[in-house]
Amino acid sequence: MKKIILSSLILVNVNSHASVEELFLKSLDSSNEVKLINLQERKTNSELDETFSTLYPSINLTSSNSYGNNSYQGKSGLKKVDGNLALSFNQDLFQGGAEFSIYKLSKIIPKKALAAKEQKVAEYFALFSSYYFQLSSSIEEKREVSKLLDNLEKRVRLVRQRTKIGRDRKADLLALESQYDRLKADLFDTESKLEEARKNFLNFSGLESAGDFKNKINPFELSLEDNVDLGNRPELKSLELEYESSLEKSKIAKSDYMPQISLGSNYYLDKYYGGSDNWDVSLNLTLNIFDFGKTSSSVNTQNVQALIDKTRLQYNRVNSNREWSNFVKVFNNKKSQLSSLKRSLTQIRKSYVEQVKDLDKGLVAQIDVIRSLDDVINLEKLYIKAALELKSLYYQSKAYLGEYPRK
């Protein structure tokens, strides 16, 4: 039997009912959200290749035409136009120190792209699990309401027969039939919510079908630890590498203040001037004297971006403990709430059964049984909703830590 692992706390057996982990892994191949995440990683790495390529030589086919009195043609008394066709070679020997930062970026960017991808996939898992539990809870709610409706239909048939022979009042029958129609309308509303939840889940996951799955996760078996390692979260890693990247980009911008040295050569395929040489080599030195603030603006932009990334990193690092503490507190409160609702639901179900027995004995009125059933219906919905919130919060907290199923 195949097994899927979600951190060290969860071990799920895949069976005929699709689990959240199993469907998540399937959606990685079908979801457009995941495709966009993968494309963004490729885009980031392609941008790095573009920057890194400046360290390598370039070979170009160049054609130049010049017009003027100083041209060779002009001095010879011919037309004042010179033309050359050459194969050119250029290599930057020194880029003001930018090459050192570019080399560092070649190490940082792939890590940053991977960390950003893991962060986005973790966020996708949090949303995926939320949609999954909305769907599974809608299915559970429909199942419970259908059970109650079936039992109530049997009760209506019984009271209708008793009313005919005078053992129950007509008013009680009408009240019971009203409750039956109200619960039936409630079932239609539940089915509408189910279809909406199914549509949202399939649209987000890209899956063709969610299958006839049944949520078997026991919310009372879930737990969160107070002390966890928050330093390895994908979001924090991504911000750290983003800040390192900004620092190196700032150095690259500052390199334009420094001299630039390049080696160039030309092999002429066609030329007008009369000389025996068909090639030349040049060593070029360029120093930026004045560019109307272009370089200073570029440096200032990169410095500000580095400050922004540093602030984001510090903000995330400082608040991570508070965020996790909030996860744990809210989770424990919702777990206590669910436990109280479970006890309350158990008691109200028992009360309803006893009310029906007492009704048959003539100890209570039909209206009391109707009210008791209303309490059962309302508590069923509250319990299902609370269980949904608890399970969704648990998986969101795992996504926050970067703990999600991997292939």
Image: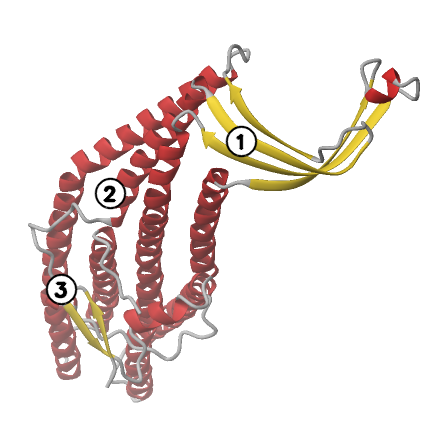
Image quadrant occupied by the C terminus: bottom left
- Tell me which corner region of the image, top left, top right, bottom left or bottom right, holds residue 192: bottom left
Q: Which amino acid does the dot numbered 3 rest on?
A: Leu
Q: Is there CB contact under 8 Å for labels 3 and 1?
A: no
Calculate the distance from the C-alpha at mark 3 to the C-alpha at mark 1.
66 Å
Residue 136 sits in which quadrant? Answer: bottom left
Q: Is residue 179 visible?
A: no
Q: Nearer the viewer, mark 2 or mark 3?
A: 2
Q: Which residue is mark 2?
A: 236
Q: Check disc 3 and report the residue beneath it.
A: 222
**Residue at the outermost front position:** 276
Residue 380 falls left or right of residue 118:
left
Disc sitting over residue 68 in the figure: none
The secondary structure type at the circle numbered 3 is: loop
Q: Is residue 192 above or below residue 309?
A: below
Query: What distance separates the C-alpha of mark 2 from that of mark 1?
Result: 43 Å
Front label number (3 vs 1)? 1
Across and down, in percent, residue 231 comes to 16, 45
Residue 263's tag is 1
Label 2 – label 3 distance at C-alpha? 25 Å
Provide the secondary structure element on which disc 1 rests: strand
Q: Reading the chain from its start, which is encountered first: label 3 or label 1?
A: 3
Kind of residue at badge 2: Leu
Looking at the image, which residue is at 23% across and 32% down?
Answer: 315
Which quarter shows the N terminus? bottom left
Mark 2: give few (<14), some (14-19) or many (20+) Cα within 10 Å: many
Front-most of 299 and 117? 299
**Position of residue 311 measured from the top left corner of the image (x, y, whole percent):** 27, 28
Q: In the rendered image of this protein, does residue 81 appear above or below residue 361?
A: above
Residue at the location (33% across, 78% down)?
213
